[in-house]
């Protein structure tokens, strides 16, 4: 029995220090963030009386503006040949924003705190992902990113369980979130936010890199395959509205706050359980196969969420949503590293994160308008349709064999 356990753990024991440090930082920050951000739409709607369209605007604007920093931060990490301290700085900015949620009492002040939190994410995301890719051999890249996503989602699960406990202790089974409960949760979230900064600052080490040189952002040298992949990602993301709409959909079907938090915890449990084995699987089979399967699954899940009329079914859809994330999310990040030269990984991760984040604004705005004008089912039917188109495109695309060993020639 012990030998079997050791065999399962041995691949993880071989992961380098940086992967563990980044994963620990992500775990702690997600404990902090998910405690607050998953109930933020409920605070806006139940306490401040904000309309769904404006909630979509807040979520989308925060993601879009922070995303503009991701390509800048990623490209800067390539030019400097340094990843760690940009990532540490991003975690620090997000930690400093948490107290602003405590004092926020208007939708504008909430939007400002939300924007600041996402600025921190925008600064850290590309250098952090590039640091993981730089620290691991290609043959174990999927495992490293899968483990990182597992740690991230496990942190989210513990954060949600912490929020659930706080709701239970402060307001019991009340159907609507109370302002006092929200502020208690914000205070508790400060501790893991600080621990996240310390984990990366103390635990990670810089990897010796060749500087990419130049002053501009070198899109052309990322290559055609990467740019075509970004186009398919853009189609998918235009229908991928903020997860706040999943929370609001569950609420519209009669699920109370405790039920919503329980579903979110179950989602992250599945996500964490699947991410590492799915990442390891992507090292043995084409990563595209897992991504295509994940996108098709996402399309079916979103259509199902749009068509359902019973609250209990959201538990099933949240569990399936966790399967999608576990299979495809970390694998997509590993696939990005497969498509580009090592010297431009920061730029590539920045470009990928920017596309995902910038499109969050129109995606969330479209979802909010659809919700208010055509009903709560319409955003999910729209998102499912676009995910299906993107999956078909990726399925039909003949992906060239990756060659990230050399930079493309300058023109």
Image (cartoon, grey):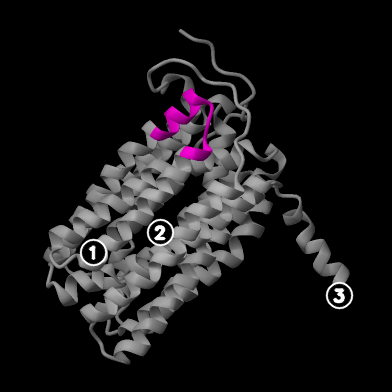
The nearer-to-camera label among 1 and 3 is 3
Q: Alpha carbon of mark 2 to alpha carbon of mark 3: how far?
A: 40 Å
- Residue 84: within the magenta? yes
Which residue is the site of mark 2?
299
Where does the image place residue 70, in percent across and percent down from the top left? 38, 38
Estimate how packed mark 1 is, as few (under 14), some (14 to 19) or many (20 or more) residues with alpha carbons within 10 Å: many
- Residue 273: within the magenta? no
Q: Quadrant of the C terminus?
A: top left
Q: Quadrant of the N terminus?
A: bottom right
Q: Earlier in the sequence, mark 1 or mark 2?
A: 2
Assess whether mark 3 and mark 2 are in contact (beta carbons under 8 angstroms): no
Location of residue 252 with respect to 341 vertically, above or below: below
What element does badge 3 sit on? loop
Location of residue 227 with respect to 58 vertically, above or below: above
Assess whether mark 2 and mark 1 are in contact (beta carbons under 8 angstroms): no
Nearer the observer, 371 or 146: 146
Left or right position of 19 against 181: right
Q: Which residues are magenta?
A: 73-85
Q: Quadrant of residue 259?
A: bottom left
Residue at point 27% right, 68% down? 40
Q: Alpha carbon of mark 1 to alpha carbon of mark 3: how far?
A: 50 Å
**Helix, strand or loop for the magenta stretch, by majority:** helix
Q: Earlier in the sequence, mark 1 or mark 3?
A: 3
Assess whether mark 3 and mark 1 are in contact (beta carbons under 8 angstroms): no
What element does badge 2 sit on? helix
Residue at point 70% right, 38% down? 137
Which residue is the site of mark 3?
1
Q: Alpha carbon of mark 1 to alpha carbon of mark 2: how far?
A: 13 Å
Estimate how packed mark 3 is, as few (under 14), some (14 to 19) or many (20 or more) residues with alpha carbons within 10 Å: few
């Amino acid at each position: 029995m012990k030998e079997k356990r050791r065999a399962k753990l041995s691949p993880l024991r071989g992961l380098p220090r940086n992967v563990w440090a980044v994963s620990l930082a992500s775990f702690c920050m997600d404990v902090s963030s998910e405690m607050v951000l998953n109930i933020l739409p409920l605070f806006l709607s139940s306490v401040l009386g904000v309309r769904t369209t404006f909630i979509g605007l807040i979520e989308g604007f925060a993601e879009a503006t922070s995303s503009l920093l991701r390509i800048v931060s990623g490209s800067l990490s390539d030019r400097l040949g340094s990843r760690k301290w940009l990532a540490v700085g991003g975690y620090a900015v997000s930690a400093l924003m948490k107290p602003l949620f405590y004092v926020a009492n208007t939708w504008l002040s909430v939007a400002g705190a939300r924007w600041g939190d996402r600025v921190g994410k925008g600064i850290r995301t590309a250098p952090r992902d590039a640091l993981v890719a730089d620290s691991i051999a290609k043959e174990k890249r999927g495992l490293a990113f899968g483990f990182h996503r597992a740690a991230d989602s496990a942190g989210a699960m513990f954060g949600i369980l912490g929020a659930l406990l706080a709701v239970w202790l402060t307001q019991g089974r009340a159907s609507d979130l109370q302002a006092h409960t929200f502020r208690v949760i914000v205070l508790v979230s400060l501790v893991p936010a600080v621990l996240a900064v310390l984990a990366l600052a103390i635990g990670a080490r810089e990897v010796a890199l060749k500087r990419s040189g130049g002053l501009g952002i070198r899109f052309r040298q990322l290559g055609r395959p990467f740019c075509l992949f970004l186009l398919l990602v853009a189609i998918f993301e235009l229908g991928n509205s903020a997860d706040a709409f999943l929370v609001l959909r569950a609420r519209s079907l009669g699920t109370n706050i405790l039920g919503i938090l329980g579903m979110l915890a179950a989602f992250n449990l599945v996500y964490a359980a699947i991410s590492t084995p799915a990442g390891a699987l992507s090292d043995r089979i084409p990563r595209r196969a897992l991504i295509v399967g994940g996108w098709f699954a996402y399309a079916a899940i979103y259509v199902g969420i749009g068509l359902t009329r019973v609250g209990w079914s959201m538990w099933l859809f949240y569990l399936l949503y966790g399967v999608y994330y576990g299979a495809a999310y970390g694998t997509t990040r590993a696939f990005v590293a497969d498509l580009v030269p090592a010297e431009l990984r920061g730029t590539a991760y920045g470009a990928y994160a920017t596309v995902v984040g910038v499109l969050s604004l129109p995606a969330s705005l479209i979802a909010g308008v659809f919700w208010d004008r055509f009903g709560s089912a319409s955003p999910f039917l729209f998102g499912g349709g676009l995910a299906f188109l993107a999956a078909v495109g990726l399925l039909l695309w003949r992906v060239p064999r990756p060659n990230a060993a050399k930079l493309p020639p300058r023109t």
